[in-house]
Image: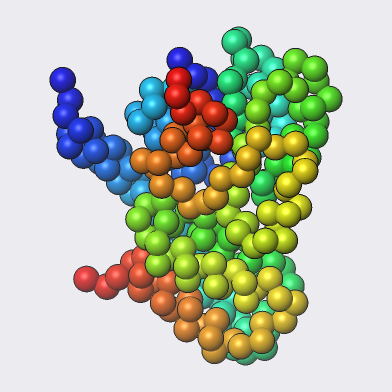
């Protein structure tokens, strides 16, 4: 019979396997936020990239906490909030948040 | 055994939710990656799902639109539908209220708590 601890461990292992499989998608999305933030800093954020980045931030906000990255969800949600505005009012802040998001989810070892 | 249909365009959300419901509650899980596919799965499932867990923002057909289409089919109207959304702003929540959903759950969800949250919303707690 499986104990509660073994059950939790099995679930964690399966969740980790799902995370590993989807990690490249998350990385790609964070890269896109980087590009959008850089473009905003140059006052060159196209409408298409603006909308795509808002959608990506929304998806990250809704998924990162599921893997235990609660801070990632918080930062992604703040990014989404900034990108839901027609114009990014504080591009430097957006850039800082994009950097923070990468650091939280993919810390340099 | 309960049978739950998960409709979400994000593959990892479907996978984690399915893992969660299967392992923590022992429920059977069906999945669909779009509103249109979700309607097809719900219509062809025998027995019908006991509940549907549905994303709000999906390409082509969003959650509320999918729900309205389901309500046009008498065979599906009895199935409670829970929204699963990352929209946490009050204005969004007010938009969903009064649309006929059985409840709203928020992303990101805790995989260990999702089944209990669904059971609570649907009054399955004491079963």
> Is residue B55 shown left or right of residue A31?
right
Q: Nearer the viewer, residue A95 or B48?
A: B48
Residue A52 higher or lower than B2, as above or below: below
Residue B23 visible to an observer of this rendering: yes
* Residue beneath the point at 41% across and 77% down: A100
Q: Quadrant of the N terminus of chain A?
A: top left
Q: Position of residue B38 (x, y in %)?
A: 66, 29
* Residue beneath the point at 76% across and 52% down: B95
Q: Nearer the viewer, residue A84 or A24?
A: A84
Q: Position of residue A85 (x, y in %)?
A: 71, 76
Residue A31 visible to an observer of this rendering: no
> Is residue A13 shown left or right of residue B7?
left
> Is residue B39 shown left or right of residue B27?
right
**Residue A55 quadrant:** bottom right
Residue A89 higher or lower than A7, as above or below: below
Q: What coloring was used for the rendering?
A: rainbow
Q: Position of residue A12 (x, y in %)?
A: 27, 42
Q: Nearer the viewer, residue A64 or B95?
A: B95
Outermost residue to the right = B72
Residue B4 higher or lower than A87, as above or below: above
User: Count the marks: how many?
Assistant: 0
Q: Position of residue B9 (x, y in %)?
A: 60, 42
* Residue beneath the point at 39% across and 27% down: B25
> Is residue B76 shown left or right of residue B50?
right
* Residue beneath the point at 63% across and 66% down: A54
Q: Quadrant of the C terminus of chain A?
A: bottom left
Outermost residue to the top = B46
**Residue B50 quadrant:** top right
């Amino acid at each position: 019979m499986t104990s509660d601890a073994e059950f939790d461990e099995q679930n964690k292992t399966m969740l980790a396997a799902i995370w590993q499989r989807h990690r490249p998608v998350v990385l790609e999305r964070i890269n896109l936020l980087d590009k959008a933030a850089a473009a905003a800093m140059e006052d060159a954020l196209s409408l298409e990239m603006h909308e795509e980045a808002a959608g990506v931030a929304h998806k990250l906000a809704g998924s990162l906490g599921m893997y235990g990255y609660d801070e990632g969800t918080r930062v992604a949600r703040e990014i989404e909030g900034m990108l839901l505005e027609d114009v990014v009012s504080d591009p430097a802040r957006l850039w800082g948040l994009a950097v923070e998001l990468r650091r939280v989810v993919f810390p340099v070892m | 055994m309960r049978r739950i249909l998960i409709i979400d365009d994000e593959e990892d959300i479907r996978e984690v939710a399915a893992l969660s419901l299967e392992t923590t509650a022992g429920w059977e899980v069906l999945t669909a990656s779009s509103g249109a596919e979700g309607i097809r799965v719900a219509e062809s499932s025998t027995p019908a799902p006991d509940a549907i867990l549905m994303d709000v923002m999906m390409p082509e057909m969003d959650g509320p639109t999918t729900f309205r289409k389901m309500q046009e089919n008498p065979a599906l109207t009895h199935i409670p539908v829970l929204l699963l959304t990352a929209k946490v702003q009050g204005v969004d929540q007010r938009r969903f209220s009064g649309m006929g959903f059985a409840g709203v759950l928020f992303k990101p969800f805790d995989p260990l708590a999702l089944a209990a949250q669904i059971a609570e919303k649907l009054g399955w707690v004491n079963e």
